[in-house]
Image (tube, helix red, strand yellow):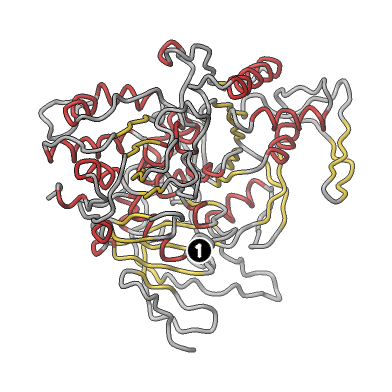
Amino acid sequence: MASSVISSSPFVCKSPAKGQKDLGFSSFRKPSQISIHGCQRKSISRKIVSVMAPQRSSSTSGSVKTGMTMTEKILAKAAEKSQVVPGDNIWVNVDVLMTHDVCGPGAFGIFKREFGDNAKVVLNLAIKILSLLAFSLIVIVTSTLKVWDSEKIVVIPDHYIFTTDKRANRNVDIMREHCREQNIKYFYDITDLGDFRANPDYKGVCHVALAQEGHCRPGEVLLGTDSHTCTAGAFGQFATGIGNTDAGFVLGTGKILLKVPPTMRFILDGEMPSYLQAKDLILQIIGEISVAGATYKTMEFSGTTIESLTMEERMTLCNMVVEAGGKNGVIPPDATTFNYVENRTSVPFQPVYSDANASFVADYRFDVSKLEPVVAKPHSPDNRALARECKDVKIDRVYIGSCTGGKTEDFMAAAKLFHAAGKQVKVPTFLVPATQKVWMDVYALPVPGAGGKTCAQIFEEAGCDTPTSPSCGACLGGPADTYARLNEPQVCVSTTNRNFPGRMGHKEGQIYLASPYTAAASALTGHVTDPREFLQ
């Protein structure tokens, strides 16, 4: 066998492809047994094993079972199969379907068009697919035939909410009409746009709200009409974005046709430096493999660093796998996962783990202790650079928010740095909590080491804008009156996930993607700044 392939990066080792020699890289793995919520769980193995999984071998007797990855196991179970391999096209039973105000009206419209104006979403699926010809699905629905499950559909207004744009407002109205008609249990409505707090059902950004409301559970299949649905993979489930047409079909059947993706594994070991966050890790990885490096592949994350991350940091990591082209991201569930989930839902779940003999198309290994804060320069998430290398880049504003960087811990991190610096910001700094709960945390939770001060108090002292109503905000531009939208060709350091031309508004705007630490440090200097200048 040939020698191993080593990446040009000093921090990552890529495993050899088929036919090349394994030099014995190692990682931590979880056991393959399944444990059920509510039952006594077996202790999680900490045994070190080789990360080079053997290639799939055929057995003439059929007595040797081929190992499967986490994603393969989840999809096999959802397809009611004992075994699947990458490339298989399978019908999958969906556990949760999420949609929001941008795609919800279209998805419900397709559902109505294909299943009939009188189609209803109720409990207990009962539908027959007569034929599948090219892209057309011919479905018979009679007056007595009922369709999918009204308690497995989650509808979350979050994108274009706090705006006077009539079309955007109408989208929410259309969703409300459909949800009332279909008796959708989990519709997080908003009617009073003047004060979000007057809407107890309103949550905010869908990907954060899904987790907070207990809709994310290990071992399940969660689909959403949003590319960042992959965030939920942090909980050890298969989660991916789908289009309106697929969503319309899922609304009617509870099923979807999926191709099983191959899995890439990313092993992150080492103690996480105090100045790094999960955003730095995922930007490092995307910079390593490019925005097309994981196209239609699973990105599975493991290692001692991953095990040390909180759930919100794991969500950040999985959130941006789509920026590498990934089909989904996934992290083996552990005690951190179980504690989070069990505090938010009583629904049983079955966690799964990759087998020791599962096959991975590539292995990357990072020594996190040697990494530095990074940014993604305009105009691509893989345009990686060290934050310290961009110290001469003058900026016009800072934006802290979104499903990627608008969670409670993201604001805690920014407040921690502002408090440590004891200075005021030099550029406008916009704060957009992801959800109503995050907004409340910003005003209620004391920042560790800040003498009892809350994030809101520290932000005010630092001269930031007052935290605004929770939503997706300016992450994807939105109507012209969207809070903090880039309406001029300015330079912005942002904790969001994409920096393509026009992403946050103006097509000539320049967006530097960064962690909350780096964003806060940059706000204090007016230039892209390494947070180590303020964090010891």
In the image, 359 versus 523, the foreground residue is 523
Q: Is residue 418 left or right of residue 468?
A: left
Q: Quick one: 323 or 117, which is closer to the camera?
A: 323
Q: Quadrant of residue 31?
A: bottom left
Left or right of 170 in this view: 46 = left
Camera-side residue: 336 or 383?
Answer: 383
Residue 507, horizontal then vertical, whole percent: 50, 45
Q: Give the class, few, some or many, for how many residues have Cα within 10 Å of label 1's Cα (few <14, many ≥20).
A: many
Give how far across and how far down residue 46 sits, in percent.
Answer: 33, 59
The number of discs equals 1
Displayed quadrant of residue 372: bottom left
**281 in relation to 160, above or below:** below
Q: Amino acid at mark 1?
A: Met
- Residue 13 locus on image (x, y percent): 38, 73
Q: Residue at x 65, y 39 (%)?
A: 94
Q: Residue furthest bottom?
A: 1
Quarter holding residue 469: top left
Q: Is residue 495 above or below residue 441?
A: below
Give the labeled residue for mark 1: 264
Name which residue lies at 74% across and 37% down.
249
Q: Is residue 136 left or right of residue 52?
A: right
Image: 468 above or below 530? above
Residue 293 point in image, percent of width and height: 52, 64
For image coordinates 73% across by 39% down, the residue present is: 245
- Quick one: 451 or 524, which is closer to the camera? 524
Q: Secondary structure at mark 1?
A: strand
